[in-house]
Amino acid sequence: MSITRGWAAEGFGRQRRAADALRSHSDLSVSYNKIGDVQVAQGDLPWALSSYKQGLEIAQKLAARDPGNTGWQRDLSVSYNKIGDVQVAQGDLPSALSSYKQGLEIRQKLAARDPGNAQRQIDLVISLWKLASVLDQQRSPQKREAGAKYQRALEILRPLAVENRLTTEQKTWISRIETRLNAITENSR
């Protein structure tokens, strides 16, 4: 009996250490993103991109290890968006487009899994908006795609506003996105 308890305790200890190690890796990924945020604020975009990519590498491994862990999936999408933000700031729109698309793909899945979760829906809006903003800077076919992304973002935001599930700042997003969508519509005539 005591041998069995010893094995069980040892097994539980290993599981706990493994879980603690995964949490530490997740914390490390978030830390790289925070370092990148400071580097962006200091105007050091190459180093920020490097930090974000280090965080992304860890987030990818964690998300692949447990695809059902929505927290790790969200962290991965945040990493893609932060990398995209730096790529936009550096003028590398094709790379930013790719990064934002990867983040959007994850956020679409998360929002679909939990449609009642306002934060998941807002995350999806942010990804749609970022992607649309890059597409909006392109030629006519991409501008139409930008318009579709802006429209989808509005379709998510408006019901959330009616349900009073947006912050004051988030409510302003509706008019800002409508302005961009109207500009695309007017320019395509």
Image (spheres, rainbow, N blue to C red):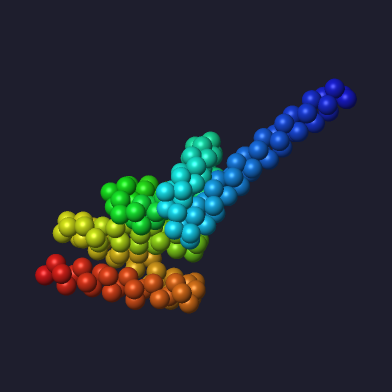
Furthest residue to the top? Answer: 3
Q: Percent from the top left, x then y, of residue 84?
A: 38, 52
Furthest residue to the right? Answer: 2
Residue 97 in view here? no
Q: Percent from the top left, x then y, of residue 44?
A: 45, 54
Left or right: 75 as drawn, with respect to 80: right
Residue 85 in view here? yes
Furthest residue to the left? Answer: 189
Q: How many marks?
A: 0
Task: Establish if 123 lies above or below 17.
Answer: below
Going 60% across and 41% down the picture, which residue do you hit?
25
Task: Establish if 173 lies above or below 64.
Answer: below
Task: Establish if 29 lies above or below 147.
Answer: above
Task: Establish if 119 lies above or below 48.
Answer: below
Q: Percent from the top left, x then y, of residue 93?
A: 29, 52
Going 36% across and 48% down the picture, which residue do you hit?
99
Instruction: Please identify the quarter of the rendering in which residue 23 is found.
Output: top right
The quadrant of the rendering that contains the C terminus is bottom left
Going 25% across and 61% down the picture, which residue do you hit?
136
Left or right: 158 as drawn, with respect to 23: left
Left or right: 29 as drawn, with respect to 161: right
The quadrant of the rendering that contains the N terminus is top right
Q: Nearer the viewer, residue 65 or 32?
A: 32
Q: Nearer the viewer, residue 27 or 116?
A: 27
Q: Percent from the top left, x then y, of residue 58?
A: 52, 40
